[in-house]
Image: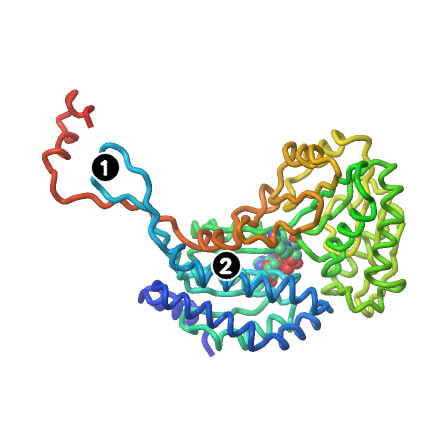
Amino acid sequence: MDTLADTLQRLREAFGSGRTRPAEFRASQLKGLSRFLKDNKQLLQEALAQDLHKPSFEAEVSELSIAQSEIDLALRSLRAWMKDQPVSRNLATQLDSAFIRKEPYGMVLVISPWNYPLNLTLVPLVGALAAGNCVVLKPSEFSRSTEKVLAEVLPRYLDQDCFAVVRGGPEETGQLLERKFDYIFFTGSPRVGRLVMMAAAKHLTPVTLELGGKNPCYVDEDCDPQTVANRVAFFRFFNAGQTCVAPDYVLCSPATQERLLPALQSAISRFYGEDPRGSASLGRICSLKHFQRLQGLLGCGRVAIGGQSDERDLYIAPTVLVDVRETEPVMQEEIFGPILPIVTVGSLEEALAFIRRREKPLALYAFSNRSQVVRQVLAQTSSGGFCGNDGFMHLTLASLPFGGVGASGMGRYHGRFSFDTFSHHRACLLRRPGLEKVYSLRYPPYSPRNLQL
Ligand code: NAD
């Protein structure tokens, strides 16, 4: 069996040989990835069900079809994305050729988490392959079944001199991070993001960090409470709440809370039945560690809806908490589970101040019948992404960049943004060998004529 050093050496040599650069090679890898998804659809659905009890609808819309559409877009756009991009010239370069060349970085590392173990591994991979890199993937050790398919089946569909999967947890990832990569793309927690950035600094390796945080959801008094409750509950409890862009908490007035609570109860009963434990539409918590952490959070504030849990099944009912204080753990850490606290505020200004005194979130949501309220929230806050009057639909558009700001991360991807992230933007100027008489005006000894240039 190859050691890590052998594997990385093989990839380095393959990149050095130049074979990943032509558009034909990149397209062949993307087609291989597409075949992998199509041939193994059933296997992948089963792996996601084993790892997260993921309902097949959720697996389809949030994992398989997102990866497939990113591949299709990259295949359609590859040649256009790879084209040199001409830029404007100044007087001194009028006769020259000036352009930006997008060139592959070399050997890149993609580290992914367990909550969307396929999407968050394959979507960055699409960008890395389209940009002509050799790639090492490090999936999460917590989504074991998906990790196994990625490690054992995916390499058969790609050029194994240019692609490798490394399995393992913090120790193995730590060993990987000691090595020199040309780019690191990390999705995961802010805590590990810091470790990745520190390791990358030793080699001056550029990074993208796709991190998490607490995504506020402001609900205005002027709204239809049932519509808002349906949308907030759907996006909060999707994947059992284990979504980096899920609405993490609701901010609203006490009067709006009174109207929202029965509407949330109604939405939860319609979506998951009277006993959500029996619902095939509700996922489970990924590990005992996270289950126990979430159970601790159930003790914050007062349970208004749900609150039941079962450790044997890693089940936590869709839960709404009220009377939550800002200082309690549920308002201090990212929840990442099916728990929705409601925090009451006296006014929109108070809600905006609440949002602004916390770290910048990955996503921010505002619900109102008044478009000026939604626009005011947008104008007076900052976040990685924003959606008015719905949950995380903004990330379904490959035409929008996806990424955080401040503590929720740095860098962006999806669609063309992925290609650009995994490409070095090389500044190129091609001048003429002749015209020395004109060029020589700049040479010393300096005199006022130098300024004519
Ligand atoms: P994590 O940070 O614990 O793990 C992510 C990856 O890092 C895994 O592959 C893991 O093996 C590796 N890792 C863990 N500890 C490490 C260490 N000490 N040294 C080196 N590598 C280590 O995150 P997670 O629990 O898998 O995922 C949940 C987090 O990811 C949440 O914070 C969530 O918000 C975030 N997330 C962000 C996005 C996004 O797109 N911004 C998407 C999904 C999840």
Within 10 angstroms of label 1, few (less than 14), some, or many (20 or more) residues? few
Q: Quadrant of ligand 1?
A: bottom right
Query: Would you place residue 141 above or below residue 105 in this image?
Result: below
* Front residue of 329 and 379: 379
* Front residue of 53 and 226: 226
Q: Nearer the viewer, mark 1 or mark 2?
A: 1
Q: Position of residue 233 (x, y in %)?
A: 78, 53
Q: Amino acid at mark 2?
A: Leu
Give me the disc on residue 177.
Answer: 2
Quadrant in the rendering for residue 331? top right
Horizontal side, residue 37 vs residue 220: left or right: left
Quadrant in the rendering for residue 440? top left
What residue is rendered at 89% in x and 47% in y?
302
Q: Position of residue 334 (x, y in %)?
A: 71, 49
Within 10 angstroms of label 2, few (less than 14), some, or many (20 or more) residues? many
Horizontal side, residue 449 vs residue 163: left or right: left
Secondary element at tag 1 = loop
Q: Position of residue 369 (x, y in %)?
A: 75, 38
Give me the disc on residue 244.
Answer: none
Q: How is the image coloured?
A: rainbow
Secondary element at tag 2 = helix
Per the image, the residue denoted by label 1 is: 94
What residue is rendered at 55% in x and 55% in y?
186
Q: Is mark 2 within 8 Å of ligand 1?
A: yes
